[in-house]
């Protein structure tokens, strides 16, 4: 994932609302969200190159999502796939904080990342940059390719737009998908400097990214209400905004 906007314990109807975009090279093979054949108790898209995932939830309400931390000056030749950090949590039984303690002890086996893991009671965040673990507080949050709630323009704008959707009498997916579809680039003077050069900073500045060979591959919405009912909807894209498929799942979590 390259941007995750979410409301946590901050809405009268939903304990958790997530709107997220995954950005990747168009040529990288990917399967849309489904309950996996080898792990039928959890729902996620799948990276068919490394067989991990970027975001998912189990039938018991275990949730995980990851973003890359952008720092081209730190590249590991033999790094493990970050997607396994999401799937390993979903497969396992550790509490969120216990799992992140294990991740912390082995974090330098991976390129930079941010990791959210939770269950129906708690949500925790791990920062690869600071090697720290924190419980997420109630509110509206944004996570892109820097630390949680870093004031990048796309993150700040996304949080504001998410807030606007949450103020409507009924939360609807069209409003949330419009947040994720925002392609407006940021003015040069407001761009972060992450070491990728000005042209790529421009390309990567919107919520929805589109370029010749890299961009937003999927937009995903997830809600969990106070009766622990999950709705998970994903739109996938072939290139730019050429929509390939939309899938949606609704289920009540199991204890």
Image (cartoon, rainbow, N blue to C red):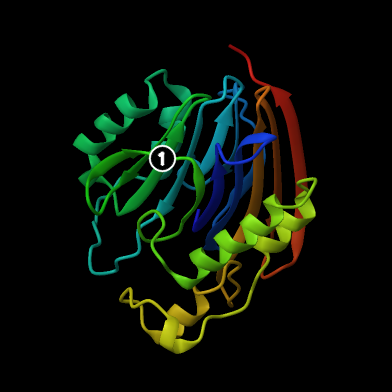
Q: Residue at x 67, y 36 (%)?
A: 12
Percent across and percent down for residue 184 are 62, 78
Instruction: Report the side of 10 relative to 200 (left or right).
Output: right
Q: Residue at x 65, y 26 (%)?
A: 226
The relative height of residue 146 versus residue 196 in the rendered view (above or below) is: above
Q: Residue at x 56, y 23 (%)?
A: 39
Q: Nearer the viewer, residue 92 or 214?
A: 92
Dot 1 lies on which element? loop
Q: Nearer the viewer, residue 81 or 95?
A: 95
Percent across and percent down for residue 119 are 49, 26
The relative height of residue 53 versus residue 235 in the rendered view (above or below) is: above
Percent across and percent down for residue 55 are 53, 42
Answer whether residue 158 is visible to the viewer in this image. Answer: yes
Instruction: Report the side of 186 relative to 116 (left or right).
Output: right
The residue singled out by tag 1 in the image is: 136
Q: Nearer the viewer, residue 180 or 158?
A: 158
Q: Nearer the viewer, residue 168 or 121?
A: 168
Percent across and percent down for residue 221 are 66, 46
Number of callouts: 1
């Amino acid at each position: 994932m390259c941007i995750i906007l979410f409301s946590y314990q901050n809405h009268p109807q939903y304990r958790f609302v997530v709107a997220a975009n995954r950005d990747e090279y168009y040529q990288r093979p990917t399967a849309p969200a489904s309950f996996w054949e080898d792990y039928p108790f959890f729902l996620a898209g799948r990276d068919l190159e490394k067989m991990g995932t970027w975001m998912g939830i189990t039938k018991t309400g275990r949730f995980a999502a990851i973003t890359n931390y952008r720092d081209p000056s730190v590249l590991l030749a033999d790094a493990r796939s970050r997607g396994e950090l999401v799937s390993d949590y979903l497969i396992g039984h550790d509490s969120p904080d216990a799992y992140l303690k294990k991740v912390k002890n082995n974090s330098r086996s991976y390129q930079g990342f941010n990791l959210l893991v939770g269950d129906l009671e708690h949500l925790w965040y791990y920062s690869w940059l600071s090697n720290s673990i924190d419980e997420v507080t109630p509110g509206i949050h944004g996570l892109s390719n820097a630390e949680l709630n870093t004031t990048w323009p796309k993150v700040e704008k996304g949080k504001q737009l998410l807030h606007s959707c949450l103020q409507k009498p009924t939360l609807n997916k069209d409003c949330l998908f419009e947040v994720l579809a925002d392609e407006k680039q940021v003015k040069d003077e407001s761009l972060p400097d992450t070491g990728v050069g000005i042209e790529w900073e421009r390309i990567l500045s919107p919520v929805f990214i589109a370029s010749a060979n890299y961009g937003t591959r999927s937009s995903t919405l997830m809600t969990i209400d106070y009766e622990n009912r999950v709705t998970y909807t994903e739109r996938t894209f072939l290139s730019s905004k050429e929509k390939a498929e939309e899938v949606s799942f609704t289920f009540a979590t199991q204890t």
